[in-house]
Structure formats: structure tokens, C-alpha cells
Amino acid sequence: MDTLTLDKTAGSADRRKSARVDAAYAFEGKRCSSQSTRFLEPKVYGMSKNISADGILFQTKEYCTVGDLIKLELKLSGWERYNPGFYKNDALSYSQPLVALGTVVHVKALFSGYYQVGVCLTGVDEGHRWALREFLKRKQK
């Protein structure tokens, strides 16, 4: 995959806390506009372009606006192995999505009705964030 560089107004490398990994992972989500407290329909479906423990860049057909809150369910097969908790609830036999809340910080219109959306992950259980970071480290190797 190609490495993506965002401009300074949209989450530049200078402000990133975690290294990004180019990776294509499917997800679904719900968005909440910055003027509302309710999650809106339709659901947001897409594919990540790159991901870190603190953010994700993805492509989708659903329009989002900067400031929208989005609840993401990331389908990362095997991420639970790195969860620091004692009881892993049979994590090796099936995979639960990693659930995170984030804020849309970048939107760019692409070809044929697609959008590129950058999200800062603002609401993630710290154990899950650590597990995501470890999962992504292993994927880089």
C-alpha cells in the first residue's frame, strides 16, 4: 500500500502520538453530528487505509463532517490476544470487534462518491488501546 501524508490542517505527522500502519481493515460505525446527541442512520461502512492506536484514516461512501462523533467497530482478527486482562473469554476461537469512539478531524472527497475520513480515537478503553498498539506492532513485522 502507498503511504499517505496528511496536510498540516488535518492531523499532520507533527501532532501524531502513535506510528501509523498501512492496513486495510473493514469496519462499521454510527455517527453523531456535532449538533446532536443521537447516533444517526445510515451506518457508516468502510475500509481503513491506515491505523494507529490513536487514529484511523478510512474510505467510505457515507459523508461525514469535521467534528462528528463516530462509534467504530473495527474488525481486527486476533487483536484480543494482546488485551492485558486476565480472562480473555475464549479470545482465540472467535474475534470481537474493537469498539472505539472518535472525532472526525479530516474529510476529503474522492472519486465516484467516496470520501477519505480521518478520525482521532478519543474514547477507547486504555487496555484495548494498548492491545491495539501491540497488535499493530506485530503487523508491522
Image: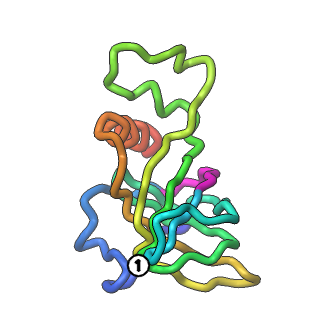
Q: Is residue 92 visible?
A: yes
Which residue appears at 60% of the width and 51% of the height?
A: 25
Which residue appears at 63% of the width and 53% of the height?
A: 28
Quadrant in the rendering for residue 111: bottom right
Residue 114 in the image, given as x and y percentages of width and height: 68, 77
> Residue at the front extreme?
37
Residue 64 in the image, given as x and y percentages of width and height: 56, 76
- Residue 35 vs 88, above or below: the answer is below
For the residue pair 135 and 128, the one nearer the viewer reads as 128
Q: Is residue 14 magenta?
A: no
| Extent of the magenta region | 22-29
- Residue 114 vs 141, above or below: the answer is below
> Residue at the right extreme?
112
Most common SS among magenta residues? strand
Residue 128 in the image, given as x and y percentages of width and height: 37, 37
SS of the residue at dot 1? loop
Which residue appears at 45% of the width and 77% of the height?
A: 35
Residue position for label 1: 6
- Residue 141 vs 13, above or below: the answer is above
Q: Is residue 5 visible?
A: no
The colour scheme used to paint the residues is: rainbow
Look at label 1 and name its amino acid: Leu
| Count of marks placed on residues | 1
For the residue pair 7 and 33, the one nearer the viewer reads as 33
- Residue 15 vs 107, above or below: the answer is above
